Amino acid sequence: MSSTASSTVDSAFGAALYAETDTALDTGASLLAADPSADAELARRGREFVATAWQRGWQPADVVRIVRRELDDVHVRLAAALIHAQAPYDGPRGPRWQAQLGDLTAEAEAPGAAGTSESTRSVAAPPGTDRFSHATTVLELYRLLLRLPALESLDEPTHRPGPASGRGTESRMLTRIRALLAKAEATGFPEEAEALSAKAQELMARHSIDEALLAARAPSASAPGACRIGVEAPYEQAKAVLLDAVATANHCRAVWNEPLGFSTVVGFEADLEAVELLHTSLLVQATAAMTKAEAAQRAGGRKRTKTFRQSFLAAYAHRIGTRLAAAAETQVTDDLLPVLASREVAVTDRTDRLFPHTTTSRLRGVNDAAGWTEGAQAADRARVGTRPRLP
């Protein structure tokens, strides 16, 4: 790295990263565009921003989510490429982190023009893109990365605990659950969707119970983990309530971060996987049911669709929560209660340590009677089944 290249990047950053004006951004982009020798240093600084985000509690999926929320697709591709470029410099990471890196593969920006070195590829301008426009994109992304706030650290073991012999069974179980939920989301027949969702919930419950029994019979050093799940606008309050209901029913706790658009779910690994799967499926089914109900309302001359949708999703989340809570209370046998109680204590303790200060909020804008009625009825149709009793 030459001193000239470092000086160019310093000058560009001084002009563009600490001032939110278009003029400052143009000045920094012009400096970078005029000095191709600065590309390697620019890429190195980008990896430093990513590494700093990790130190502040962010994970790959979190960074991509916030970039997608605040900027454009070109910035998402650039962020994914920087994350991949930083990966070889990171220490050992857990399975969930590695899975996030795998999910980012399709997002990563294509390699630059022939002759681009590995050290600069993450910020190299794609073929056909002028250097000034690309430098502007890079600086806009770096502005965002520079201002990321600190998050709770969701450390996970680099290897999931448990007997190796059980991992294949778990993989087959989760694959089957995903397939059932995908079919429930895709079918146009409500009765078929109900049956598929019920079967998926039954398998989730069985999987969770199997894990709890295994912990009771062969105690291990496993502890609750945590993951972040995006809760995106619009109608994010109702979506957060739905996620909280699903988390509670599956022995987890959910804490919503409204400004950053995600909830942190705390629980044991098998239960976290169940929450992710079921929440995604129920949200897809709710959206499909809402769109259908809204179309019927508009056909009858109704025009106020925003309040209808907000009330629909709020009622859907409320009704799903009521039914899941009832199922969780009545379908567990007495011999399982001690281990479930100990796991609940562990989950609560981890949640309290991660979030010592939380507040509650009330749903806003839920004042449409037709939307509430339709949402509650849709939740009843989205039957998720009950927890099977142990033999």
Image: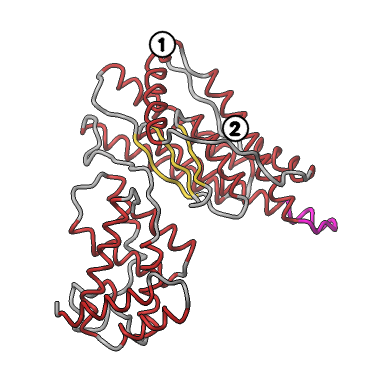
Quadrant showing the C terminus? top left
Estimate the x, y position of residue 140 in percent, counting from the top left: 41, 72
Q: Residues within 10 Å of mark 2 (few under 14, many from 20)?
A: many
| Closest to the observer, 165 or 48 | 48
| Closest to the observer, 110 or 260 | 260
* Residue 299 within the segment the image draws in magenta: yes
Above or below, 218 relative to 118: above
- Amino acid carrying label 1: it is Asp
Estimate the x, y position of residue 32 in percent, counting from the top left: 30, 82
- Amino acid carrying label 2: it is Gly
* Residue 142 within the segment the image draws in magenta: no
Q: Which mark is residue 321?
A: 2
Helix, strand or loop at label 2? It is helix
Q: Which residue does the numbered mark 1 point to in the structure image? A: 335
Residue furthest out toward the top = 334
Of callouts 2 and 1, which one flags the residue occurring earlier in the amino acid sequence? 2
In the displayed structure, does residue 158 sit left or right of residue 192?
Answer: left
Above or below, 356 relative to 151: above
Looking at the rendering, the stretch of residues picked out in magenta corresponds to 293-304
For marks 2 and 1, give the CA distance.
25 Å
Estimate the x, y position of residue 224 in percent, counting from the top left: 34, 31
**Number of numbered discs:** 2
- Quadrant location of residue 50? bottom left
Estimate the x, y position of residue 223 in percent, counting from the top left: 30, 29
In the displayed structure, does residue 151 sit left or right of residue 124?
Answer: right
Residue for point 32% across, 36% down? 170
Quadrant showing the N terminus? bottom left
Q: Residues within 10 Å of mark 1 (few under 14, many from 20)?
A: few
Helix, strand or loop at label 1? It is helix
